[in-house]
Amino acid sequence: MSRPAQNFYEQVYAVVRRIPRGRVTSYGRIAQMLGRPNGARAVGYALHALKDHAAAQHESIPWQRVINSYGRISLPNPERQAELLRAEGVAVNDELRVNLDHYLWPGLHWAEIDDMLANG
DNA sequence: ACAGTGACAACAT
DNA sequence: TATGTTGCCACTG
């Protein structure tokens, strides 16, 4: 297996879909789960690309649960994401920051990632 | 084929 | 604490 079966974007989306309601994770953590410890920017790029996808698929991916390692929203216009997070119980302060000690998603174990990439 | 781009992250001032 | 710099990666024209 010199190379994953799916492309990187799809792997990112698969992980994001598993983030539970009311929790958040970071671009870098997702990259690490996928075996790319330095691929944080690419994860952000993958989510940005959602705007070019069909609306239905866009709705099914909880992109708002992904923020940066500092616990801050990374979008230029952060209000939309802040609203979505607050709507599911995540406290976002006036500085657009989330307390990671309280809302951070533990993430998937390597075995779960393995199964996800194999079966979907 | 190759340089440019961006919803990152870590480190240095 | 707040900027600025540098390394990274996948994707695009």
Image (tube, coloured by chain):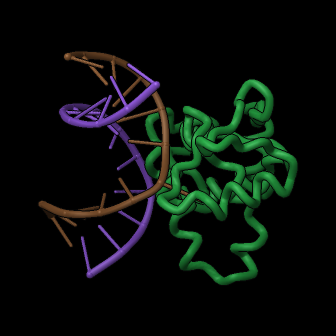
Chain colours: A green, B brown, C purple
Nearer the observer, A97 or C12:
A97
Image vertical order of residue A54 relative to residue A99, above or below: below
- Residue A49 % position (x, y): 52, 69
Residue at position x 46%, y 51% from top? A42
- For this view, does A68 lie left or right of residue B3? right
- For this view, does C13 lie left or right of residue A30? left
Quadrant (top left, top right, bottom left, bottom right) of the N terminus of chain A: top right
Image vertical order of residue A12 relative to residue A110, above or below: below
- Residue A76 % position (x, y): 47, 59
Nearer the observer, A71 or A105:
A71
Residue A70 image-quadrant placement: top right
Residue C13 image-quadrant placement: bottom left
- Residue A26 % position (x, y): 61, 40
Residue A58 image-quadrant placement: bottom right
- For this view, does A21 lie left or right of residue C9? right
Residue at position x 86%, y 53% from top? A88
Residue A30 in view: no
